[in-house]
Amino acid sequence: MTDAFFTYRKNVLLAKSPSTQIEGVFAATTGRSVPEEQEALLQQWLEEGEGNLPASESVPGVRRESVTLTSDWLEGSELLMTSLSDLNTSPEVTRCADQQHSELNALASSELQDHAVAELARLPSEETVTVAGSAPWAAVVPQTDHQTAGCADINVQVLNDDPAVLAWSLACDAETLPPAQPIQDAVPFYPVPTEVPYHEILWRDWEDLSVQPCVLEQVSKNTPLFEFRVMSYNILAQDLVEQGLDLYVHCHPDILSWNYRLPNLLQEIQHWDPDVLCLQEVQENHYWEQLEPTFKEMGFACFYKRRTGAKTDGCAVCYKHSRFQLISLSPIEYFRPGLDVLNRDNVGLVLLLQPVLPEQGLKAVSPLCVANTHVLFNPRRGDIKLAQVALLLAEIDKIARTAEGSYYPVILCGDLNSVPDSPLYKFIRNGELSYHGMPAWKVSGQEDFSQQLYSRKLLAPLWPSSLGVTDKCQYVTLCQPKKPGRREYSRDFLLQFRFCDVACERPPQLVLLEGVTDAKPVASAREHSAVTAVPKRHNSLSFLDKQCSGVIQHGLNLTSVYSHFLPQRGRPEVTTMPMGLGATVDYIFYSAEPVESKAGRRLYKDGALKLLGRLSLLSEDVLLMANGLPNPFCSSDHLCLLASFGLEISSL
């Protein structure tokens, strides 16, 4: 409670003092005692305001109080995933409230409330609180007692008795403080309205999509579904944090440490309880030493692929072995020596899983293909991104193709480093892209480099034939299997082309010989079958022409789980927020049935794989209120994606 009064009085003194006098003051971090400057301000408070307190309400131990931010707080992700009603009814709430109710009531006198309101009312309306060199929550301890040690579960009624919180709430009601403009070497402080608890700003709703007509139709037919959840999460490798600290200047150093982030990440994954987990930016030593052992205890079977070269992170796919069995596993390395279009160290994983039915009777369910990848970030090298995605789709084509030539249901997860409606996104969703002459930076849509004098352009073919991948994103060995003797040009093989159009055209330089070179060959009825081979030859030639026309295709029929727009807020969804700018680069695509195409956009409906629900995303303005990503509650610079699916269970 003394921390709360210290916070309130500190804001008043900060607002009265010039910035040159407060630089570096009140930078409270874990385990650090109050510095001499803070003690001086506290002494000033005691001299000015202690006379207004009844003798029984003096705070003799404040001067030696140490300020702690993280050690005893509730875990941030727990707050994100716990409603206020849950906090109020939990056993810890009752114990904490009983232990500290008397102390709170003693300190929360009417005189203190009046004193707090009077002090805050004297603040100029245009003045904002900015602490040089400190993070926003280092300047002010979070305004709700839901986050403090022991008091984290205090009843809401008891919370309202806190005079510092009450005074701050009244001041916020009287006027809306504009965001602080950062000064040199300073981090702006964006106050969070007290009427909305801090963790509820980042609240994410579960959207039930099982009421869709196509799903209701299946329910009406009593078609059973094998239901499961899939999560895709870029968890931010610690090595990448330390290599790019300039990207996280808005973050307090304590929340960037792996020891702080790991429990939050694990708790978030454990809370949502996915059956299939696709992770990106998984640091290798953390995976083997911490993540894999923990996931195995949670019932997961895990597979990991580190990026090639000297990179220390990679991708992981985990699945509940009680729900799925592994049929095949295929790791992918996008690096190809000697190819400029594939000279980066990104990787992917493709798994074919067999769902495990609880009752082994005369029931069957289709295998499921799960792919996970992290595509190159560089916004200027869209050619590399496109080639990497083509390789991934070729591998999915190989793993998910059935003996009849169709595909098992596919779920594609990952950080594609491309925004919605970019050419790369449209290629995955629409199944076709004409890329010849396209500027390379335009492929992902991350940044606009149109003003540059020189920009790399994509030329056909995008990759050489030696790669063994066609422009339909299929391996050559699969779409054109070798036949015995296919290169033996026998007499019968050559005779097939006797009456083709090219053979029947008289060359202009040919000497005219009557009865020999003046007549056009005519096929007899016996040789009619040879003429029918001509269209096949022309089809193969046209296919070769299309390969060099700058058009790539795939036949997987994939659509996105998310719509990339929040209709309630009228704003786009955001999955990451680098340097304070929100963007969507993370996706979960799944197999669907195309119904029609409008203005070049393919429309889908659910097929054997049905989308039953998803975890809502947030908008950029909401994340700005929480100081972006990462923050004390979300320990990655990406939000997790979560979707619930249903696979049709058929009778044998």
Image (cartoon, rainbow, N blue to C red):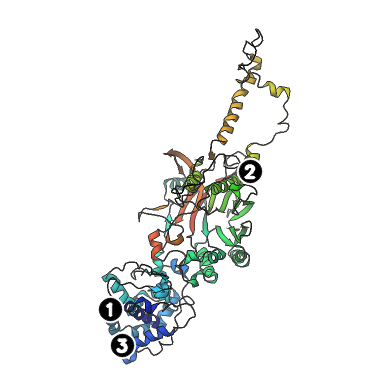
Q: Tell me, yes or no, whether the two marked residues, 3 and 1, touch with CB atoms within 8 Å.
A: no
* Residue at numbered disc 2: 467
Q: Which amino acid, by three-letter code, is at mark 1?
A: Val
Residue 295 sits in which quadrant? bottom right
Q: Nearer the viewer, mark 3 or mark 1?
A: 3
Which quadrant is the N terminus positioned in?
bottom left
Mark 3–mark 1 distance (CA, rounded to whole Å): 16 Å
Crowd around label 1: few <14 · some 14–19 · many ≥20 (10 Å): some
Crowd around label 3: few <14 · some 14–19 · many ≥20 (10 Å): few
For the residue pair 510 and 503, the one nearer the viewer reads as 510
SS at circle 2: helix
Instruction: Say whether disc 1 or disc 2 marks the residue closer to the N-terminus.
Output: 1
Where residue 169 sits in the image (x, y, percent)? Answer: 31, 73
Residue 404 sits in which quadrant? top right
Q: Tell me, yes or no, whether the two marked residues, 2 and 3, touch with CB atoms within 8 Å.
A: no
Q: Nearer the viewer, mark 1 or mark 2?
A: 2
Mark 2–mark 3 distance (CA, rounded to whole Å): 78 Å
Where residue 55 sits in the image (x, y, percent)? Answer: 32, 92
Where residue 597 sits in the image (x, y, percent)? Answer: 44, 38
Which quadrant is the C terminus positioned in?
top right
SS at circle 3: helix
For the residue pair 243 and 534, the one nearer the viewer reads as 243
Instruction: Say whether disc 2 or disc 3 marks the residue closer to the N-terminus.
Output: 3
Mark 1–mark 2 distance (CA, rounded to whole Å): 72 Å
Which labelled disc corresponds to residue 117? 1
Relative to 524, 23 lies left or right: left
For the residue pair 449 and 545, the one nearer the viewer reads as 449
Q: Which amino acid, by three-letter code, is at mark 2?
A: Leu
* Residue at numbered disc 3: 48
432 up-or-down from 179: above or below: above
Where residue 216 sits in the image (x, y, percent)? Answer: 43, 47
